[in-house]
Every structure is written in structure tokens, then in C-alpha cells.
């Protein structure tokens, strides 16, 4: 299940990609399949081991084209172990709401992104997330949990302050917001067979949707995304230095279209 829309955020074979706070690796795997040179970084050592195993399995099965590379490594988002201008693309998905020093993370991402490079940031959307917080303290009052809810203009403002130039936004996962509302209402800590029947039933629907991708749910999610999409996604470029090609020459839209 991808949150970044690669039709709006295209990759070229050979692009150097950092998936920061990669978690289980969903975006890193997609970038690898598209021929990128991927670094998946997370502070969770167990998840990094799993991502490394999946990278190895993908390579063995020939899922990535020739020239693509993939590395999984443990690291700190506030002290990235890379030189300046190391990456063409940086992705940070559903991470910044967990980190107290979000400005520090943005500064590090901008530092390692080359001039003219592209960045994708996704966070929980304000409205659906506010409902989750209202329904359940346990949803956010846990170690490592969500510590803030971003408004769209707040996140875009912080990206601009960090030196980025936003060029597009959208919402994603409209089918997933009701699942989290149900989970919060019936007990967010109840998982698997212990979850309430409505939660289990809706989870089965989501799994079916992810596996089968039927037209009916694709159309439903497309209609729901602008209304109750669970995630807010923003794309931006790092401005070029004097003498470099301009964003327009690189094919990036010149101005952001902001969705609340």
C-alpha cells in the first residue's frame, strides 16, 4: 500500500533515493522495482533486518532491473550518516508526526538532497487524525506515538522555511480512515482475534482491497480521498544553485496547489 503517488512523483532509473523512516519498507521496495539506487533507513533495528531480507529476496527473484541497488541501514533521522547533496530523491512517509524536532529532520533531509532534487512528505491528515485523537487517548499517548497533528498549511510552511519549494499536494487512503475510527472507538490496543467484530470485518475488506484491487473500491477511494483521505501528501523540490538548470527545465511544476 503506497502513500506516495509515483505518477505525480516520478523516478528515473539510477536515481539515488533515501527512504527515511522506512518502517516495513513499502516505498523503498517500489523505488527498487523502478530501478533506483535505494537506501532504506530506520531507527528500528528489527524492521531494518526484515527490509534487508526482503531486498535480498527481491534481488534473487529478479524483481529489480539491472543497475538498481538496495541497502537497509539503521540510523538517526536527526544525524544522517551521509554527505551533503547525496540523494536525488528523499521520501519520508508517516514519520514526522512522531518526531519532536521536525524542523531538525527537515533540515537534515534538505542537507542530503541535491539541488534540484525532489522530496515527498506524508503525514496523517488533520481532520481524520483529529477524530482518532478524540475517540482514543491510547491512539496517540504511547511511547513513540503521534505527538502532533499537522494542518496542510503548517506542514507546507515548515517545508518552505527549510528551503524547499512545494509543487503539489493530494490526499490518500480514504478507505482507511473509517477503519481507524472503528479501531479507536472499540479499543486501539485490541488486535487480531481480540479486535471487535466491526474492526475485524473492516480489516478483511482492506486486505481484500489491497490484494485484489477491484474497480469498485478503487473508484470509492478516489471519491473518498479528497473528503476523508487518511494521509496528506506534499511534494517539493530543493531550489537549484545559480548556474544550475531551473525547476521548470527539470520538469517540476512551478507552484504548489495546496489542498487543506
Image: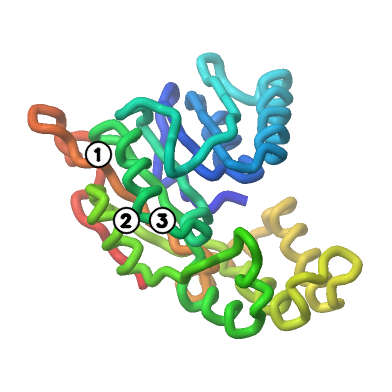
Establish if 187 lies above or below 236.
below
Residue 74: name its quadrant.
top right
The mark lying in front, picked from 2 and 1, is 2
Tag 1 secondary structure: loop
Residue at the farthest right position: 193
Q: Check residue 168 in the rendering and tell me which mark sits there, or answer none.
A: 2
- The quadrant of the rendering that contains the C terminus is bottom left
* Residue 188 vs residue 101, the one in the foreground: 101
Tag 2 or tag 3, which sits nearer the N-term? 3
Q: Which residue is mark 1?
A: 251
Residue drawn at x 66%, y 35% as measured from the top left: 48
Circle 2 crowding by C-alpha within 10 Å: few under 14, some 14–19, many from 20: many
Residue drawn at x 81%, y 78% as measured from the top left: 198
Question: In the visual, does 150 lie left or right of 98?
Answer: left
Tag 2 secondary structure: strand
The mark lying in front, picked from 3 and 2, is 3
The mark lying in front, picked from 1 and 3, is 3
Tag 3 or tag 1, which sits nearer the N-term? 3
Disc 2 to disc 1: CB gap under 8 Å? no
Q: Position of residue 52 (x, y in %)?
A: 67, 29
Q: How many marks?
A: 3
Establish if 204 lies above or below 19.
below
Q: Which residue is mark 3?
A: 101
Amino acid at each position: 500500500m503506497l502513500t506516495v503517488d509515483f505518477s505525480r512523483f516520478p523516478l528515473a532509473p539510477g536515481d539515488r533515493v533515501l527512504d527515511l523512516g522506512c518502517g516495513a519498507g513499502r516505498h523503498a521496495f517500489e523505488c527498487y522495482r523502478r530501478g533506483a539506487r535505494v537506501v532504506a533507513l530506520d531507527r528500528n533495528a528489527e524492521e531494518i533486518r526484515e527490509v534487508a531480507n526482503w531486498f535480498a529476496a527481491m534481488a534473487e527473484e529478479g524483481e529489480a532491473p539491472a543497475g538498481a541497488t538496495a541497502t537497509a541501514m539503521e540510523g538517526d533521522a536527526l544525524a544522517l550518516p551521509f554527505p551533503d547533496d547525496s540523494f536525488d530523491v528523499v521520501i519520508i512517509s508517516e514519520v514526522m508526526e512522531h518526531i519532536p524536532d521536525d524542523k531538525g529532520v527537515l533540515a537534515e533531509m534538505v542537507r542530503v538532497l541535491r539541488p534540484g532534487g525532489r522530496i515527498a512528505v506524508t503525514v496523517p491528515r488533520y481532520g481524520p487524525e483529529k477524530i482518532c485523537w478524540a475517540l482514543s487517548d491510547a491512539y496517540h499517548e504511547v511511547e513513540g506515538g503521534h505527538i502532533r497533528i499537522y494542518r496542510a498549511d503548517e506542514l507546507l510552511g515548515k517545508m518552505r522555511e527549510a528551503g524547499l519549494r512545494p509543487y503539489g499536494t493530494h490526499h490518500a487512503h480514504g478507505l482507511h480512515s473509517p477503519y481507524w475510527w472503528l479501531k479507536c472507538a472499540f479499543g486501539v490496543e485490541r488486535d487480531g482475534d481480540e479486535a471487535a467484530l466491526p474492526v475485524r470485518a473492516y480489516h478483511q475488506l482492506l486486505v481484500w482491497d489491497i490484494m485484489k484491487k477491484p474497480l469498485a473500491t478503487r473508484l470509492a477511494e478516489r471519491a473518498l480521498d479528497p473528503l476523508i483521505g487518511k494521509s496528506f501528501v506534499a511534494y517539493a523540490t530543493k531550489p537549484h544553485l545559480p548556474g544550475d538548470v531551473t525547476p521548470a527545465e527539470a520538469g517540476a511544476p512551478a507552484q504548489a496547489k495546496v489542498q487543506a
